Amino acid sequence: MRIKTNIIDFMEEKLYKPMLKEELAVQFGIEERETKEFYKILNEMEREGSIIKIRNERYGLVSKMNLVVGKLQGNERGFAFFIPDDRGMEDIFIPAEGTNGAMHEDRVVVKITNMGSKDRRDEGEVIRILERANNTIVGTYESSKNFGFVIPDDTKIAYDVFIPKEHINGAKNNQKVVVEIVRWPEKRRNPEGKIVDILGCVGEKGVDILSIIKQFKLPEEFPPKVKQQANIIEEEISEEEIKNRVDLRDLNTFTIDGPDAKDFDDAVSIEKVENNYRLGVHIADVSHYVKEKSALDREAYKRGNSIYLIDRVIPMLPEELSNGICSLNPNVDRLTMSVFMEIDSEGNVIKHEIVEGVIRSKARLIYDEVSDLLEKNDNKAFEGLEKIVDDLKLMNELCNILNERRERRGSIDFDFSEARIILDDKGKPIDIVKEDRRIANRMIEEFMLVCNETVAEQMYWAEVPFLFRIHEEPDDEKINSFNKIIHNFGYMIKGSQEIHPKELQRITKEVKGKKEETLINTIMLRSLKKARYSSEHNAHFGLAAQYYTHFTSPIRRYPDLQIHRIIKSFNKGRLSSKEQARLDSILPKVADHTSKTEKIAEEAEREVDDLKMTEYMSERVGNVYEGIISSLMHYGMYVQLENTIEGLVHFENMIDDYYEFDEDNYYMIGQNTGKKYRLGDVVKVRVVDTNLIKRTIDFMLVH
């Protein structure tokens, strides 16, 4: 909005002194009938954190008053860390007495009260709460005679919520509830709330995951309008629509997914063209069914992505689309956005085209069965599918070529084994197993990567508004810290100048197959920035890719859906200057919003995994396991077991000596014995305690 820019420009002038809203209205020539709208804009700007109203009702720029705007990250001990909106700024420590009633995730204005030093963060105080994040809180109700308290599930919320008698609303002791805040915390006073939903008793089937769904405010049902739109979508593709597309139904296409997958948004095909490979990546054409600004589209945007919570999926789109007409099921006609890439023996894409197609998938293949075929020549699952077997072997060749090309340019490949949590029919975890990335998984991964890069590069050079997936270079401080840690294992990052991904790739190769491999790769990953969506082009550091986007999963990611629409408009010559200006205005919001929904999904998925892992270990208190020291803290050390479960050996449980953390040398040392524990050391531990509320597991060393 131009008026906001004008206000900021005016306030940035050297001679500007904070003014009353009436004075600003006069300054900008606002007529009386327009003042209400002008004051509304000032309020909006204050909520956004660009300007602030000081005590004498005058407005000034936040940046000119040595104030910063951002979000609060709470801690159960009452203090917090302030994460500035300005990505270039360091986090600021907020002591408990400086939070001034602000809670975890609140958007706030902070004044710096103490400048930090090399080893100490800046310290600050919250002076204004711009936006509250926790209007409702999920937790466990604890009753007293005439009142109660709700203990939040989110340990970053440091306050218990006081519930007066008249607001208990039938909740009973030890039930999971949702409480609405009616009075915010003040100094020496907890927040006050009323119970608005009772989820069930602690331990009751499904209540634990439902609590996490409520905690993260995840959607549970699609609104009636969205369901209605999904229900009226035709389940058959008309001949007229097929005539407008490239007919690929005779092409040997097939999907490869996990055994439990229900939504198939990508199929692949391959042909040999002289000495080159013609790879086809066929993506469900979701944009044909989900029209921009429709109820379906608005809900998909709001959700941002699908969320996978072990025993359930919270989909971005209703099942009628995600598992039905948009899913590339075998032996039925399906609409696609198909990318054909001719790739030479060095892995270079020498030409490509993106078409609107219609395919008929010939088979629904399973990752493990394809891997058994390619790794062990076990073809019992492929009787009668000789043409597909030939294509899979050709794909295996191309996968290796593409992988070698990525490796040559410095792409970092974290070969993590994922943990799969197996639940019984009551939702109880009965096993946790590691799943390796086998050849079939890596093959599809390589094909999606090259497809995403190819699409991103074409749209970059087309100079049209677009959404990129970017991964910025890591901070020097984090890389130096990582270098210090790996030095204890005998590894070192060379050079002190701007780091190239090849250096980190070299470390991943050096640790491959060693006991510290998972540990060092995990610490490296934590040292890197988080990939995000952006309407501005930037490289992808981790992939060492100059151009990258997300094109291949429009059923479960909104950016992919948005990108399909842009590509269609571009191919049909519909990107007028007016349309490009519209995209320029909306794409930054789409990028920001979907980066946030992705983060929420990851946190919710991790929370469910942590909960079920804790529940699994709560049945195994007293058991002894072998693990590797994965992290060192001032209060103890974390040990990771073979099945990826991590627990804390607290100093108070290290009873053979008094231990302290030597940060310079990065080890734990006993004051009397001089015994040292370092990252990567293999140790035996006994499970001594678990806490399902905090999702924590406590270990004790077994000598």
Image: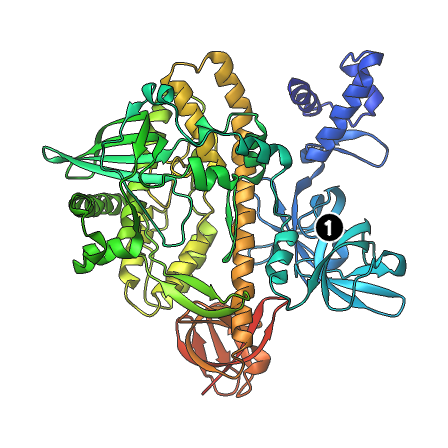
Residue 521: quadrant of the picture? bottom left
Q: Is residue 460 above or below residue 642?
A: above
| Residue 304 percent coordinates (x, y) | 53, 39
Give the left or right position of residue 141, taking residue 521 as reference.
right
Who is closer to the viewer here, 379 or 532?
379
**Do we see residue 432 in this rendering?**
yes
Who is closer to the viewer here, 492 or 335?
335
Q: Residue at x 60, y 40 (%)?
A: 222
List the residue tagged with mark 1.
Answer: 136
Looking at the rendered image, the quarter that the N terminus falls into is top right
Give the left or right position of residue 47, taking residue 456 as reference.
right
Who is closer to the viewer here, 459 or 233?
233
Give the residue type at disc 1: Thr
Q: Is residue 441 above or below residue 228?
A: below
| Residue 444 percent coordinates (x, y) | 30, 46
Give the left or right position of residue 31, taking residue 115 as reference.
right
| Residue 273 percent coordinates (x, y) | 13, 32
Q: Residue at x 54, y 86 (%)?
A: 657
Q: According to the image, what is the colour scheme of the structure?
A: rainbow
Looking at the rendered image, the quarter that the C terminus falls into is bottom left
Residue 460: quadrant of the picture? top left
Q: Is residue 357 above or below residue 444?
A: above
**Do we see residue 466 in this rendering?**
no
| Residue 505 percent coordinates (x, y) | 30, 52
* Element marked by disc 1: strand
Give the left or right position of residue 559, taking residue 387 as reference.
right
Density class for disc 1 (Cα within 10 Å; few <14, some 14-19, many ≥20) is some
